[in-house]
Amino acid sequence: KCMQKQNTFTDFIACAEALHEGGWSEPSLTSIEGRSGGGLLMGCVVNMRPDLFKVAIAGVPFVDVMTTMCDASIPLVVGDWPE
């Protein structure tokens, strides 16, 4: 999972490009939204390809993964889930 995470970002970007190339949308009309892990996705794709999106909403983004996973005092962190 960890080693393939980049595919999540590039696949999302490829989908946006396909929407634009197919005439379904254009960057000035494309908005994206994600919460938690989807907020991480929004942050990454907007930094990688800001030209593709007009608006991005990252609701409660899970962007500091290392700090969160290493802090056992944070609820919902399960250290025994292999990545």
Image (cartoon, rainbow, N blue to C red):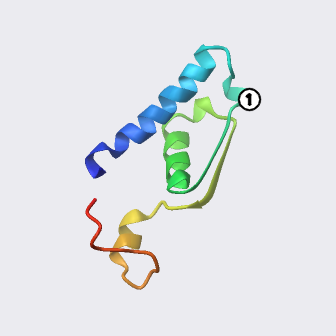
The residue to which callout 1 is attached is 29
The residue lying at 35 percent from left, 74 percent from top is 78
Rendered position, 83 above or below 10? below
Q: Position of residue 71 (x, y in %)?
A: 37, 79
Residue, far top: 22
Q: How many marks?
A: 1
Rendered position, 62 above or below 73? above
The residue lying at 41 percent from left, 72 percent from top is 68
- Within the image, what quadrant is residue 27 found in? top right
- Within the image, what quadrant is residue 81 found in? bottom left
Q: Where is residue 3 in the image (x, y as percent from the top left)?
A: 26, 47
Residue, far bottom: 73
Q: What element carries label 1?
A: helix
Task: Classify mark 1: residues with Cα within 10 Å, few (<14), some (14-19) or many (20+).
Answer: few
Q: Position of residue 30 (x, y in %)?
A: 69, 32
The residue lying at 42 percent from left, 41 percent from top is 8
Q: Where is residue 46 in the image (x, y as percent from the top left)?
A: 55, 41
Q: Which amino acid does label 1 sit on?
A: Leu
